[in-house]
Amino acid sequence: MVVDPSIERAEPGSGNARDNRHADPIFQAEANAALERWLQDHPEIEGELKETVRAHIHFQELEARTREAEQMLQIAEQRYATLQTRHDVAGHRIFGCTIGLALVVALVVLDAVPLNWAAQAFGLDSGGTWLVTCILVVASVGAMVGFELTSGHPRQRSLLAAVVGVAYLMLLGLRTQFLTTVAGESAPVALLQSAMLTAISAGLVLCGSVVLARTRSFTLSHSLGIVRRARRGAAAARIAQGLASQKLQRHIGALWQMLLPWALGTAAPAGVDRAKWAVALRQSVRQLFPVS
């Protein structure tokens, strides 16, 4: 039997480091030649040899996939690190884009209730009241976004806070007047109710701005998702490569078990004891199927 020439042979010195300490190039070349003669003289191992070749090819394919997956992971991590340095250098943004937006939407929906009560102070019909409510909701969303956009500009943020404060004071006055004139409430009770509604609405807006400040941008969140998928892919590739390596080692071990009786019954070269000869033959088997 002739060994498939497509099988890559390792240079003397590769493979098992412990075996290489006992083998020099000339002595190992004799062992390689002896192994080739044995493979030609024993066709009964052809089946096991083919299975080992297939296992080795499969291992090489998975090894290449693992290297590719690790390269993709490295590129994804570098890109995420660059974006994080640009958009979130302190690492304060803990919410993903989807979760952050969902929380903001929930806060806006909750804010619509006190804003609708405040819109009733304008004394409009049902349609007009809901129109004013929508306008106030949009204004609240604008305030949330405005606080986020002006986070790095104290002067603009102070101006925005002043405008929002004046707007809530106007709503407080309108609601208080509505309760005293229409509902017939006393001034202290009307002021207390209006202050509670205004405080709730302002608190929801502040909560929304805080959530936005802790939410990653779409680009950063998307990049983090790519990193997580790349990590899972690299981990799966490493596991598959490990399983393929174990399978290849089992086939190499089976070949060695078939070689062992012949190695023990074959005379070693002059000046070489049988133990070193067996080690060299085993190294020759490993060199047929190099594993990095």
Image (spheres, rainbow, N blue to C red):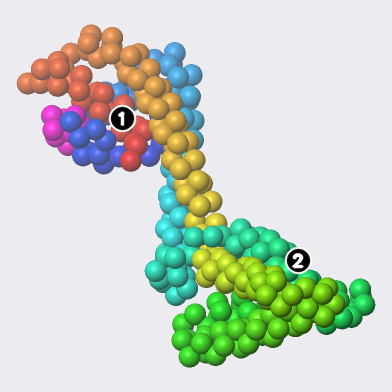
Of residues 168 and 153, the one drawn nearer to the viewer in this rendering = 168
Residue bearing mark 1: 286
Q: Is residue 126 left or right of residue 246?
A: right
Q: Which residues are magenta?
A: 19-28
Most frequent secondary structure within the magenta stretch: helix
Viewport quadrant of the C terminus? top left
Q: Is residue 204 above or below residue 44?
A: below
Q: Which mark lies nearer to you, 2 or 1? A: 2
Amino acid on which disc 2 is placed: Val
On whether residue 26 falls in the magenta region, the answer is: yes
**Could you tell me residue 155's position as x and y percent?**
48, 90
What amino acid type is highlighted by mark number 1?
Arg
> Taking the image as drawn, is residue 186 in sight?
yes
Q: Is residue 116 magenta?
A: no
Above or below: residue 248 compared with residue 232: above
**Residue at mark 2:** 113
Residue 137: name its quadrant: bottom right
Q: Position of residue 49 (x, y in %)?
A: 43, 23
Identify the residue at image location x=26%, y=35%.
15
**Which disc, if any, is residue 8?**
none
Please tell me which residue lies in front, 112 or 22: 112
Q: Residue furthest front?
A: 186
Residue 184 at what x, y percent from top left?
Answer: 82, 74
Residue at the spot 13% in from the left edge and 29% down from the top edge: 22
